[in-house]
Amino acid sequence: MDKITISEIYKYAGKEVKLGAWLANKRSSGKIAFLQLRDGTGFIQGVVVKSEVKEEIFQLAKSITQESSLYVTGQVTEDERSPLGYELQVTGIEVIHQAVDYPITPKEHGTEFLMDHRHLWLRSRRQHSVMKIRNEIIRATYEFFNQNGFTKVDPPILTGSAPEGTTELFHTKYFDEDAFLSQSGQLYMEAAAMALGKVFSFGPTFRAEKSKTRRHLIEFWMIEPEMAFYDFEDNLKVQEEYVSHIVQSVLDNCPIELKTLGRDTDKLAKIKAPFPRISYDDAIKLLHEKGFDDITWGDDFGAPHETSIAESFDKPVFITHYPKSLKPFYMQPAEDRDDVVLCADLIAPEGYGEIIGGSQRVHDYDMLKEQIEKHNLPAEAYKWYLELRQYGSVPHSGFGLGLERTVAWISGVEHVRETIPFPRLLNRLYP
Ligand code: 4AD
Ligand code: MG
């Protein structure tokens, strides 16, 4: 008899198999027991019929506690009603470990309780689906960038510089020096692009943000591509093609997970390049038309503004050419006016907010030097970055996609805390 996983069950219709599994849930009557089994690769219903198994097996089925670990043997049968399309007619059960009272029961629990039990909550069908979708997005990311001639480069986590401003840095000692946890690998990726042309990174980033919202994590994962000889327009093209690719990959490869989460897949099917664009100037006008009277040119957008702008489109929308005063020091000003920069934020539909921030970078030595001084950045820490503009400097562009916000949007889950295995939030380091 083959020992198999639930993910390969479709190859075994009509056959007798053995599964290692946990008991996710159970219903039973006098004559029949339904075991919801999970093995990490999926979920399947095991059916134990009293009249068809030894009495001791039926009694065992009725007494197993939630989350006990088991070896289950049985015959695979097709079943149209199950999401998987198959059931297991159980013939034998061997208990590996009988679990003590499991804290997460099928009844509703509060968020704080679930967060305190994140190490167990991850086992639920919903969390399993979100993690599978996260994994698919990561897989499709590597696929996209490898297919398009990018080289993966790993920037450091311990750094001496701060691309996104100095207010949200995690500080640590680095022997006798001061260091920060990386808030973005971008500056290093710019150096890498001058060595390797088209590069991308995927790694953790850290922001000591005091924000407690559904979109903010203290530790989150970012994908940061950077391309030599790419201007602002070229950059947007890569972004819309990349985002389309990951959405379509999830649709193709995670149908069960999307169904489990109740995701409206018609909305996702529309996510294909090209994406609409709106300038910051026009976005301000649009907001005024929609009744946001208090926002004026030069103000940053908050979540309600982003959501309202996104509502006018059924695809992600690029908001371009923000005021220079709102954005970091490294962004290239527009050719025809000095008060806006060649940047774009990509805003996801359905209220999920900004998933990408990107721009063309300043490539002129004097202009960058002036910007570093204007922003009062320590010259010593940025010496190497400025030097990149002294040896064959070229126009170049890049962006950062926040993985967790992207997972939240594609999965249709409300809060980013469910999109990373162990979220680091304001006031939460446990578990
Ligand atoms: O817009 P941000 O700050 O851009 C950068 O860091 C650039 N240096 C990236 C680059 O051009 N290489 O962050 C990029 C994205 C945001 O659009 C958002 O999706 C995500 O990172 N992000 C967060 N996600 C979760 N929690 C937070 N606190 C986040 N801050 C940013
Ligand atoms: Mg941003």
Image (spheres, rainbow, N blue to C red):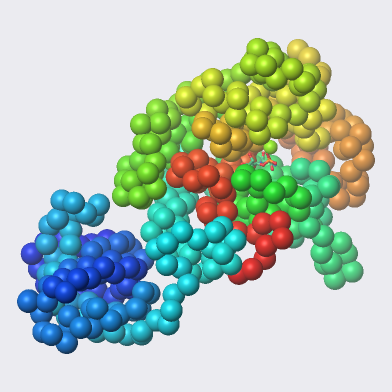
- Quadrant that contains the C terminus: bottom right
Q: Examine the rendered structure and indicate whether residue 369 appears above or below residue 187.
A: above
Rendered location of residue 190, percent (x, y): 69, 42
Q: Determine which quarter of the picture holds residue 356.
A: top right
Q: Determine which quarter of the picture holds residue 89.
A: bottom left
Residue 39 shows in this picture = no
- Quadrant that contains the N terminus: bottom left
Residue pictured at 48% horizontal, 65% vertical:
121
Which residue is nearer to you in this view: 347 or 389? Answer: 347
Which residue is nearer to you in this view: 390 or 214? Answer: 214
**Image check: 339 left or right of 69?**
right
Quarter, ligand 2: top right
Pick out the residue farthest to the bottom: 56
Residue pictured at 46% horizontal, 42% vertical:
412
Rendered location of residue 289, percent (x, y): 65, 12
Q: Examine the rendered structure and indicate whether residue 279 appears above or below residue 358.
A: above
